[in-house]
């Protein structure tokens, strides 16, 4: 796996374009968290079709700027000129904008009757399933219409050397355990909240936890399919290895609103998963890593809160 990263870096690294994109990402991260832009502006936008346009425009700013910077500083980068690329990019930005706008969640809440006792718990389940619905339906429709000539389904193929992914997951555990102790992370994780759902349903907490964490894990399958499957593997035919870096920028913007350390980690994690997808033409290793990291973060955060509570009461 080290050799794959080395080979990709040697082939793709272009100092001016990499530096310009890094400066753009760094400035955007600082500006977002300095002004809390995504939470105070985007998420406060009224529900309606204008919200979809605002979110899609926000993500278009990230993706198109990264494409432009690469094109300006790397004259050998010509894939962006293909009209087909812009059709795919428009479809992708529509999907990620729809996902970010939370409009599908709003529509589901409107049509599904939810009792007061289960409102908060079911809302979190629907949040995961609405994201799954957007990316799954969007990519299936795209593959069957605009991209009928593509081979396979954007990375759903066997990945080699699965032991390497397990080693990466094990290596991440100390960092996840340390992150779970940070106040910013403890405000967000674990994302599971029972809100008394097990009492209202008259079932074991194991079932409510299991149902939520299953939807949470499945959501990351679709996240990998979209970001690494479509935006990298699906666009290799047009952009080549240059598909990776714009995906990373979009992925970082998608993380705005999460703890700052998680967004910074998305720079490195997004790049690593992108390179793995590019080299292997598979997303399955990335799916394993992403789900493993997400569920371990849930576990470590729950343990950290329990330990903090016991320590405080003691």
Image (cartoon, helix red, strand yellow):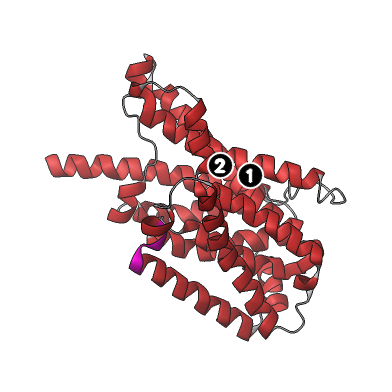
Q: Are marks 1 and 2 in contact (CB under 8 Å)?
A: yes
Distance between mark 1 and mark 2 Cα atoms? 6 Å
Answer left or right for 149 relative to 301.
right
Give the image quarter of residue 135: top right
Answer left or right for 262 relative to 281.
left
Q: Report the predominant secondary structure element of the magenta stretch.
A: helix
Image quarter hosting the C terminus: top left
193 and 163: which is toward the camera: 193
Which residue of the protein is positioned furthest toward the top in this rendering?
A: 202
- Location of mark 1 (residue): 135
Q: Position of residue 61 (x, y in %)?
A: 57, 67
Q: Position of residue 27 (x, y in %)?
A: 45, 75
| Structural crowding at the residue carrying mark 1, measured as other residues with C-alpha within 10 Å and reported as few (<14), some (14–19) or many (≥20) | many
Q: Position of residue 192 (x, y in %)?
A: 39, 36
Say what secondary structure mark 2 lies in: helix
Q: Is residue 149 above or below residue 198?
A: below
Q: Which mark is residue 131?
A: 2
Image quarter hosting the N terminus: bottom right
Q: Which mark is residue 220?
A: none
Query: Can residue 55 be seen at all in this image of the molecule?
Result: yes
Q: Is residue 198 above or below residue 163?
A: above
What residue do we see at 42% from left, 25% from top? 208
228 and 175: which is toward the camera: 228
| Structural crowding at the residue carrying mark 2, measured as other residues with C-alpha within 10 Å and reported as few (<14), some (14–19) or many (≥20) | many
Q: Was residue 17 drawn as part of the magenta stretch in this picture?
A: no
Q: Position of residue 32 (x, y in %)?
A: 41, 66
Give the image quarter of residue 7: bottom right
What residue do we see at 47% from left, 62% from top? 265
For the record, the magenta segment spans 34-38
């Amino acid at each position: 796996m080290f050799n794959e990263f080395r080979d990709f870096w040697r082939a793709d690294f272009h100092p001016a374009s990499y530096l310009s994109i890094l400066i753009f990402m760094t400035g955007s991260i600082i500006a977002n968290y300095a002004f809390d832009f995504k939470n105070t502006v985007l998420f406060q936008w009224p529900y309606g079709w204008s919200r979809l346009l605002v979110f899609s425009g926000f993500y278009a700013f990230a993706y198109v700027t990264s494409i432009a910077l690469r094109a300006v500083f790397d004259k050998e980068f010509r894939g962006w000129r293909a009209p087909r690329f812009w059709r795919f990019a428009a479809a992708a930005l529509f999907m990620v904008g729809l996902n970010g706008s939370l409009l599908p969640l709003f529509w589901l809440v409107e049509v599904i009757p939810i009792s007061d006792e289960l409102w908060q718990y079911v809302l979190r389940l629907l949040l995961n399933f609405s994201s799954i619905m957007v990316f799954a339906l969007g990519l299936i429709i795209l593959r069957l219409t605009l991209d009928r000539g593509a081979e396979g389904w954007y990375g759903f193929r066997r990945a080699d050397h699965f032991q390497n992914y397990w080693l990466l997951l094990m290596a991440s555990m100390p960092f996840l355990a340390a992150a779970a102790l940070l106040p910013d992370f403890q405000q967000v994780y674990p994302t599971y909240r029972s809100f008394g759902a097990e009492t209202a349903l008259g079932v074991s907490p194991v079932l409510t936890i299991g149902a939520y964490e299953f939807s949470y894990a499945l959501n990351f399958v679709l996240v990998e399919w979209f970001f690494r499957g479509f935006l990298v593997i699906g666009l290799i035919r047009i952009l080549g290895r240059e598909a990776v870096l714009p995906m990373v920028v979009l992925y970082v913007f998608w993380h705005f609103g999460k703890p700052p350390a998680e967004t910074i980690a998305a720079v490195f994690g997004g790049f690593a998963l992108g390179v793995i997808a590019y080299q292997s033409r598979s997303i399955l290793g990335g799916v394993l890593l992403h789900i493993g990291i997400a569920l371990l973060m849930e576990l470590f955060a729950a343990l950290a809160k329990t330990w903090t509570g016991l320590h405080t009461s003691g």
